[in-house]
Image: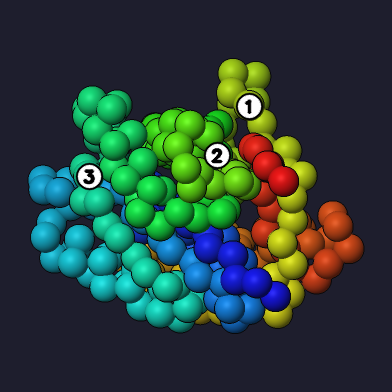
Amino acid sequence: MRPVTKLVLAPHADDEVLGLGGSIARWAREGHPVHVVVATRGYPPVWSPDEEAACRAEALEAHARLGVASARFLDLPAAELDTLMHRELNRHLLDAVRRLAPEELYLPFLGDLHRDHQLVAQSALVAARPSHSGYPRRLYAYETLSETNWNAPSLTPGFIPNHFVDISGTLEEKLGAFAAFRSQVKAPPHERSLEALRALAVLRGATVGLAAAEAFVTIRTVA
């Protein structure tokens, strides 16, 4: 099997694990290089330096568990991407796409509740435009439990998946990677609990006859 370079864009550290941690683990196991770009970090006074340092260490531990090939942190302000000039975020993501030249690009769903997710999705589409050499040939939007499921279907697009990745063999790796985010894991029935993540994977898998899966919306494919 020919290796396929994949790039995952995460608005915040942990979105990549919540959305497609099982897929990342599977692809890495199969020999596909998976790169992650995390757009933001927390800054005072909302987040203390110690909190941010802990989150960064947790992200690196999670990436190591999943087999991520490389991680880049853009260090833009979390929950404040809407204070930046849009072209600045465009520039950062375009630089990552051109530098890594992924064949597949994974981005947050445009209809997510969090504004940071929406802005990263919009800038990702700008960065992936087929107007430069090496543009990604396949684009997919992933779902993030606690963001995608809280959109307003009457006002924003609903997440209707049409692409599924079998993670029956890597679900435990996904759960282990999210468990590394000790500052983020909650007790059930909270959405950010290990039990909720397992339930979503089982549900997505059941819809296509699998024990566990992660679901995506196909944005564009070029054969």
In-image side of 51 versus 101 (left or right): left
Q: Which residue is mark 1?
A: 157
State whether residue 118 is above or below residue 180: above
Tell me the element at label 1: loop
**What's the amino acid at mark 3?**
Leu
In-image side of 58 versus 46 (left or right): right
**What's the amino acid at mark 1?**
Pro
Displayed quadrant of residue 83:
top left
**What's the amino acid at mark 2?**
Phe
> Dots 2 and 1: beta carbons under 8 Å?
yes
For residue 76, the mark is 3
> Which of the two residues, 180 or 222, is positioned nearer the viewer here?
222
For discs 1 and 3, the disc positioned in front in the rendered view: 3
Position in image of residue 10 (x %, y %): 41, 51
Q: Residue at x 36, y 41 (%)?
A: 94
The single residue placed furthest to the top in the displayed view is: 155
Upstream in sequence: badge 1 or badge 3 = 3
The way the protein has been coloured in the rendering is rainbow
